[in-house]
Image (tube, rainbow, N blue to C red):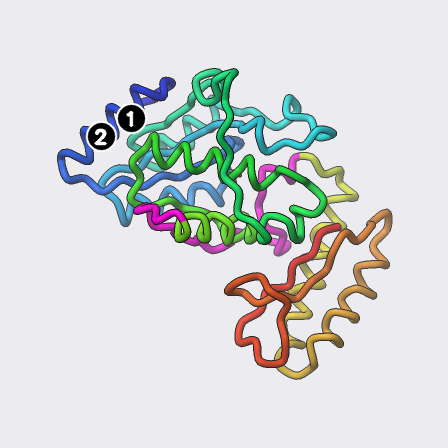
Amino acid sequence: MRIIKNVLQMQKVALNHVKNGDKIGLVPTMGALHEGHSSLIAKSKKNDDITIVSIFVNPMQFVVDEDYLKYPRTIEKDVEICRKNHTDYVFVPTVNDMFSVNHKTFVEVKTLQDILCGKFRPSYFRGIVTVVVKLFNMSYADRGYFGMKDFQQFKIIEKMAKDLNFRTKIIPCPIVRERSGLAISSENYYLSIEENKASENISRILKEASKDFKVKDLNFVKESVLDKLKKIPDGKVDYAEILDFNDLSFAGKNTRKVVFAVAI
Ligand code: PAF
């Protein structure tokens, strides 16, 4: 496994693989790797000749009152996890190499970036999409792997790749959960014991609701979930929406597959 810290070096190495006819898989991450990331790496190892894991805490996707500096950084452990998963390259660019002081170009996916979490975190998805486009261009990726845990992020990147004719195929990967049912996430590090319990509870409430979809109407399911969510101590519901799985529009009677998106 080779660690690459320089953008030009990454492009040079990736281009050589393209010339050799290798298929390249990219697993973009912000580090603090866990089993969820390992499952993405495993999927790339199965599909691709070469697997690149990028580790870059992207300042562009932190909003003003969030602390970019506090984001967990566990680079030595991350490198070990990559090694165990037989990653070919770990790409760890610096902020200065990634974004020049004169950076002026941003990629936006209108509408999808403004709903759900985007309403509460302006410019968040713009920061994510911009860095993902850059990572695709640096790695010459044939496939990019994204967890369905960040469902809005996945849908936005999928749409960007389609709209901009990217040759990189966006591969959705199933959520990896703790035994409690809570999705494993680097951001869970931020939770206190009480908040962790509350999060497990949210996951349980949604799982129960998933059974109701077959027999009850959407409004009933939404209201009964909202009632339960409002009882969570210290919780303030930002949104609870039942949406069409395909395009994140509001789900109706005829929607075939739905996603229930909740933020507290
Ligand atoms: O999901 C993440 O870890 C990040 O949003 C990503 C896709 C690596 C972009 O910084």
Q: Is mark 2 within 8 Å of ligand 1?
A: no
Residues at badges 1 and 2 in contact (C-beta under 8 Å)? yes
Considering depth in this image, is 95 or 174 the residue closer to the camera?
A: 95
Badge 2 local density, few (<14 within 10 Å), some, or many (20+)? Answer: some
User: Residue visible at 57% across and 29% down?
Assistant: 60
Residue 261 visible in this rendered orientation of the protein: yes
**Residue type at mark 1?**
Gln
In the depicted structure, whether residue 62 falls above or below residue 97: below
Specify the quadrant that holds the N terminus.
top left
In the image, residue 243 above or below residue 158? below
The one nearer the camera, 133 or 53, is 133
- Residue 220: percent from left, percent from top: 75, 76
Q: Which residues are magenta?
A: 164-189
Q: Could you say where residue 57 lies in the image, as x and y percent from the top left?
A: 53, 27
What number of labels is visible?
A: 2
Q: Which residue is label 1 attached to?
A: 11
Q: Residue at point 29% right, 31% down?
A: 88
Report if the beta carbon of the residue with label 1 is closer than 8 angstroms to ligand 1: no
Q: Quadrant of residue 135?
A: top left
> Horizontal placement of 111 versus 48: left or right?
right
Q: Quadrant of residue 245?
A: bottom right
Q: Which of the numbered marks, if any, corresponds to residue 15? A: 2
Q: Looking at the image, is 21 positioned above or below residue 15?
A: below
* Residue 187 part of the magenta-drawn span: yes
Q: Residue at x 82, y 50 (%)?
A: 236
Q: Circle 1 sits in a helix, a strand or a loop, which is it?
A: helix
Q: Is residue 145 magenta?
A: no
Mark 1 vs mark 2, CA separation in Å: 6 Å
- Quarter occupied by residue 189: top right
Residue 178 visible: no
Q: Main secondary structure of the magenta part?
A: loop
